[in-house]
């Protein structure tokens, strides 16, 4: 919320409607500036006034943000990220280009659904190992339930632990929580891929999902939270070990990371 308020204060200052500090506090000066914007109802709660102003300003700049209703959802979030980038850099975000993402393969993960893959990982559901997380996870389907363990394939176990320890060192537990990097969507799950008949990489325990509610299957980078620059170091941690993000490679299913290469 602080980032949203700071952006609002910056825009209001540019419009000559605010002369206070860019401090992320929605005080009297900030709210007085908002009250002078057509379409922002001062009788609404503060959060809705702030959201509505962001929606109005983004729309005026030609950024698709959905309805101007004062409600924060995926479209508003995507529009906010684009607005934030334009104000900071003076130009739109660069288009998503998967060919620019070069992922090394130090662990020699095989290409999915090949003979080499079968030889490397064996039968689905076998060779599993219980591992400990370096920080507490919340189960994405029931955030009241916490866990510090999961089952994965024994060949990826050390890699997962190295990565998550590095994530903890870089972000710290407070930011991990703020960014929902502790919203765990699961690892081993013997099932077919969604909307298909082939076996999911989860069936071998070589894929993990994170923050699924904000990174849904068919969402692209315009809506998925994990596509935001705040997560660049997160992806670097995984990609240094050769893990593949379907979001960064194919621009869908941003929640999903796997220790198997994609076919060319």
Image (spheres, rainbow, N blue to C red):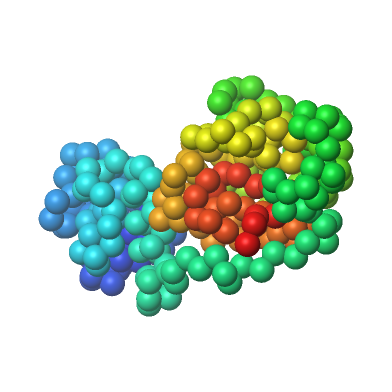
- The percent coordinates of residue 132 (x first, y second) are 82, 34
Whether residue 90 sits left or right of residue 49 in the image: it is right
Q: Which residue is found at the position 70% from the left and 32% from the top?
A: 203
For the residue pair 120 and 127, the one nearer the viewer reads as: 120
In this view, the residue farthest toward the bottom is 90
59 versus 160 height, above or below: below
- The percent coordinates of residue 40 (x first, y second) are 18, 49
Q: Which residue is found at the position 52% from the left and 35% from the top?
A: 196
247 versus 43 height, above or below: below
Instruction: Residue 3: tell me if it is visible.
Output: no
For the residue pair 41 and 237, the one nearer the viewer reads as: 237
- The percent coordinates of residue 33 (x first, y second) are 23, 58
For the residue pair 144 and 225, the one nearer the viewer reads as: 225
- The percent coordinates of residue 100 (x first, y second) are 58, 71
State which quadrant residue 56 falls in: bottom left
Q: Which residue is found at the position 18% from the left and 39% from the top?
A: 43
State which quadrant residue 92 falls in: bottom left
**If the image is split into quadrants, where does the C terminus sit?**
bottom right
For the residue pair 216 and 52, the one nearer the viewer reads as: 216
């Amino acid at each position: 919320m602080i980032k949203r308020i700071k952006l609002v204060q910056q825009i209001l200052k540019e419009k000559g409607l605010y002369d206070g500090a860019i401090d992320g506090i929605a005080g009297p000066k900030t709210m007085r500036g908002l009250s002078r914007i057509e379409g922002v109802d001062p009788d609404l709660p503060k959060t809705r006034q702030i959201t509505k102003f962001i929606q109005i300003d983004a729309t005026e700049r030609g950024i698709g943000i959905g309805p101007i209703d004062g409600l924060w959802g995926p479209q508003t979030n995507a529009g906010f990220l684009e607005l934030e980038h334009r104000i900071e850099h003076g130009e739109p975000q660069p288009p998503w280009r998967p060919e620019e993402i070069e992922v090394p393969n130090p662990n020699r993960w095989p290409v999915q659904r090949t003979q080499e893959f079968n030889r490397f990982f064996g039968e689905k559901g076998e060779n599993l190992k219980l591992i400990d997380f370096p920080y507490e996870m919340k189960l994405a389907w029931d955030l009241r339930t916490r866990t510090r363990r999961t089952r994965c394939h024994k060949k990826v176990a050390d890699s997962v632990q190295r990565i998550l320890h590095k994530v903890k060192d870089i972000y710290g537990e407070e930011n991990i929580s703020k960014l929902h990097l502790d919203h765990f969507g699961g690892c081993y799950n013997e099932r077919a891929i969604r909307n298909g008949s082939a076996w999911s990489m989860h069936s071998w325990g070589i894929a993990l999902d994170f923050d699924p509610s904000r990174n849904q299957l068919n969402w692209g980078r315009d809506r998925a939270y994990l596509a935001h620059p705040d997560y660049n170091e997160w992806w670097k941690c995984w990609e240094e070990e050769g893990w593949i993000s379907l979001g960064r490679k194919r621009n869908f299913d941003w929640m999903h990371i796997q220790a198997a290469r994609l076919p060319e």
